[in-house]
Image (spheres, rainbow, N blue to C red):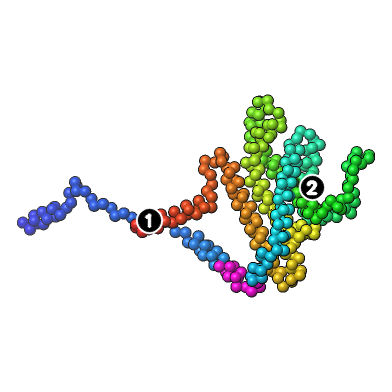
Amino acid sequence: MPESSGAAVSLAAAPSADTPSPPATAQRVLPLRRPGRWIATAIVLVLVAQFVHGLVSNPFYQWDRFAYWFLRPTILDGLLITLEVTALSAVLGLLGGIVLALARLSRSPVLRAVSWTYVWALRSIPLIVVLIFLYNFSALYKTLSVGVPFGPAFFSFDESRLATDMVVAVVGLSLNEAAYAAEVVRGGILSVDQGQHEAAAALGLPKGHQFRRIVFPQALRSITPNYVNQLIGLVKSTSLVFYVSLLDLFGSAQTMGSTYPGDIVPLLLVVTVWYLILTSLVSVVQFYVERYYARGATRALPPTPLQKLRTGLADLRARARREAAI
């Protein structure tokens, strides 16, 4: 009897096969640990903090003198000259680059050879050499004339009166910029699908009309972003016009540094910050130009910095809500 009752108790305690099992406890999925990333981030933050602390606390930088010189009329006048030289050189350089690119793509062997030689020479010679050579051009040719080769001249003019400091700076930068712009334009034209050329020719359109209305508008998608990027280098290259006696931003700071030798470092910091501002503005223009010409080439336009900020904040809020729910 005791054995039978023990067996009965054991059978009664055993769960039935039809009884549903209790629900499994929900488990949180832990993210993959990346200690190397956190260590690298901590090291970079420490280095950045030390760099910023050195900039702020080091008396050698003389930030009070930096604030004094930053908006001085002399510096602002040089900044205006820098902007003027950059704008004129950018426009003239792009126009010259278009002409050179068309000559490189021409069927004429003379035009191709001359264009190739020009691009090769101007990309090989340092810009400072070009500027100094143009600055002393009047020593080689005191007068310039236009007329029949090896014959009479129709009219002539004094080169020294025409070649002012501004003209020398703009011409030198434009000649150098045209060589680089030519390759940018040529690459943009070659990026247009050959079928577009064939379709334009099948319509019986003149060559000039094909280029202006069909080929070149499509090539701008590649030309414009690349040339805007080229402008960043042009902004910095304007600092060399000081060597042809044009007081641009760098030239004005250099002159003031000679007059006030104790303020050389603050003046260099002023120039650095202004160039950072100018190149940053060009970079913003480059972003929106690339975004504009990306229409039709990508399924979705790249987000703007403001859109990226909103998305990042939304992700942080969503993550915080998930953490609070758990």
Quadrant assignment for the N terminus: bottom left
Badge number at residue 322:
1
**Residue for point 71% across, 69% down:** 264
* Magenta stretch: helix, strand or loop mostly: helix
Instruction: Indicate the position of residue 197 as horizontal and vertical percent values.
Output: 66, 31
Badge number at residue 174:
none
199 vs 300: above or below: above
Q: Amino acid at mark 2?
A: Ala
**Residue for point 65% across, 50% down:** 229
Residue 300 is covered by the magenta coloring: no
Q: Which residues are magenta?
A: 49-62
Residue at the far front in the pictured view: 73
Closest to the observer: 224 or 182? 224
**Residue for point 71% across, 32% down:** 208
Q: Amino acid at mark 1?
A: Arg
Residue at the far left in the pictured view: 1
Q: Is residue 310 left or right of residue 173?
A: left
Instruction: Indicate the position of residue 92 as horizontal and vertical percent values.
Output: 74, 46
**Residue for point 47% across, 61% down:** 35
Q: What kind of element bears circle 1? A: helix
Structural distance between the alpha carbons of marks 1 and 2:
63 Å
- Looking at the rendered structure, the number of numbered marks drawn on it comes to 2
Q: Do we see residue 136 in this rendering?
A: yes
Q: What kind of element bears circle 2? A: helix
Instruction: Indicate the position of residue 297 as horizontal and vertical percent values.
Output: 56, 40
Quadrant assignment for the C terminus: bottom left
Write down the quadrant of residue 212 in the picture: top right
Q: Which of the two discs, 1 and 2, labels the residue nearer the N terminus?
A: 2
Q: Do we see residue 141 in this rendering?
A: no
Q: Which residue is mark 2?
A: 121
